[in-house]
Amino acid sequence: MLHGDLPYVDVWDRKPIGIFLIYEFFHLFGPYRVWAYQIGALLSAWATSILCMKIARFIAPVAGAFVAGCLYLLWTSGAQGIGGQAPIFYNLLITGAMLAIVTCLNNRRPETIGRTGLLVMALFGIAIQIKPTVVFEGIYAGLFLLWMRYRAERSWSVLLTSTLCWCGIALIPTLCVVGVYAGLGHLHDWWFANGSSIFLKKQVPHNTWKDFWHWTHWAFTITLLLVSILALRALTTRQKPANPCLTFITGWAWTAFAGFILFGCFSKHYALPLFAPFCINAAPLWRAKTGRLWLAILALWGGQRTLSEIKQVQHTGSAHELKQITRLLSSPGGCVFNFNGPDIILDAVPYCSLTRLPFSAHLSSDTEKTALPVDPDTEVKRILALSPRYIIIEDDRGTNAGLNMSTKALLDEQVKASYREIYRHRQSSNDDNIVIFMKQ
């Protein structure tokens, strides 16, 4: 992108333009780009935790609000948030928008509703261009603001005007992106990546116990987290149910949870948007002894998950091993085709434009083969015809679940005929290896 490549046209992925731009900015730091994105993600997570604490102060004492901010950091770290996932950045925008609504609710000044609506919809409009799934929370926030507007004005004309104005503000970032791509003649490419391709993906298979356990375990964990917080809060605290701030914040948690369930993907990082509303809703538990005990358990539970996540990352690989692989792929240099290995390897070596689908999960994944802008078999044949000097695969001898066996067969045939193995690194005890082949 820094050299002129256009997302969805020259580099394809199913991400809004916002996340492309965020990481393009971090790449301006050159050899320090990993430090840059980690620092950026850390600052974003810290600022979000501060906003969580400020929102929680409307429904909880200072200590409870402080614990809510700490819980947010613990639980996001334990759900792959340490990798700089998109929610780490857009959670800041969403939490800022919700703080604006709660502040407006609390001051009870009707004249501030209009300005609050503009601010909230502007923040959601930007967030949508980082991750479209924020639309669930955006709709909830918009409807709540319209209810506030109607209650204050009792005018259908004012309500209609506010609806059109706020929706327009929320759509401005997306319309700007659409306008740019339409002007460049690539509107179809933008729409396919951001719209229609999502519905062309196949269902993720759960034909192994490991995959099934991961999804069901995490879905159960998230459900338990929300239900336990709300049930215990209802049983142990004496807050009035009519408290509008409490009502709004509770509705936010349920809306985020509904979006998570409806999306149908229960991987860890898809739960990252849930932790801000969940932890804020937990803050009032500080008022009761049983509630404080549960907050302590949540902190220990989140801390344990964070330590487990750190150990998993450390076990997968190290900077030393990445440098070793980088040196290997540079002696001699040449194009690298990463079929299904770690994507960070391509960021560590000189870029070679073999394909517009450089991300390994696309050409190697069975769930993606009907949702790509090109036929994966044809694309792999085209890439192999260019004779890349190196090919990287992740050799998992335990299972081939989710692998596109057609493209894998094409690759295996070419590797057997023209390549030799020069590197193998075991990532885990399940025979999950990174294997590098070099052109003979």
Image: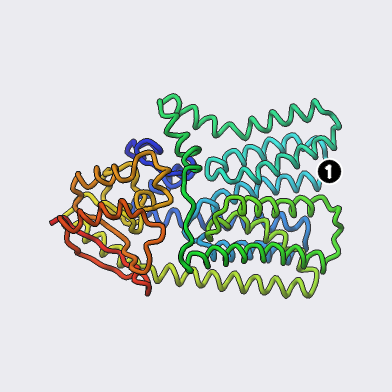
Q: How is the image coloured?
A: rainbow
The local crowd at label 1, few if under 14, some if 14 to 19, many if 20 or more residues have their Cα within 10 Å, is few
Whether residue 111 is visible, yes or no, is yes
Task: Answer above or below: position of 369 versus 61.
Answer: above
For this rendering, which residue is in front, 224 or 349?
Answer: 224
For this rendering, which residue is in front, 202 or 118?
Answer: 202
For this rendering, which residue is in front, 114 or 242?
Answer: 242
Query: At 26% across and 44% down in the image, what residue appears?
Result: 354
- Which of the image's four quarters has the C terminus? bottom left
- Name the image quarter holding residue 393: bottom left
- Secondary element at tag 1: loop
- Name the image quarter holding residue 371: top left
Looking at the picture, how far across and down is residue 23, in whole percent? 43, 47
For this rendering, which residue is in front, 233 or 108?
Answer: 233
- Number of numbered markers: 1
Does residue 411 appear to the left or right of 66 in the view shown?
Answer: left
Looking at the picture, how far across and down is residue 74, in whole percent? 58, 66
Q: Residue furthest left?
A: 440
Of the residues shown, which amino acid type is indicated by label 1? Answer: Arg
Query: At 68% across and 56% down in the image, what residue appears?
Result: 277
Query: At 45% across and 36% down in the image, what residue appears?
Result: 192
- Which of the image's four quarters has the N terminus? top left
Task: Name the residue that disc number 1 marks.
Answer: 108
Does residue 234 appear to the left or right of 316 in the view shown?
Answer: right
Looking at the picture, how far across and down is residue 285, in whole percent? 76, 67
Looking at the picture, how far across and down is residue 115, in whole percent? 72, 35
Whether residue 40 is visible, yes or no, is no
Query: At 57% across and 53% down in the image, what residue appears?
Result: 264
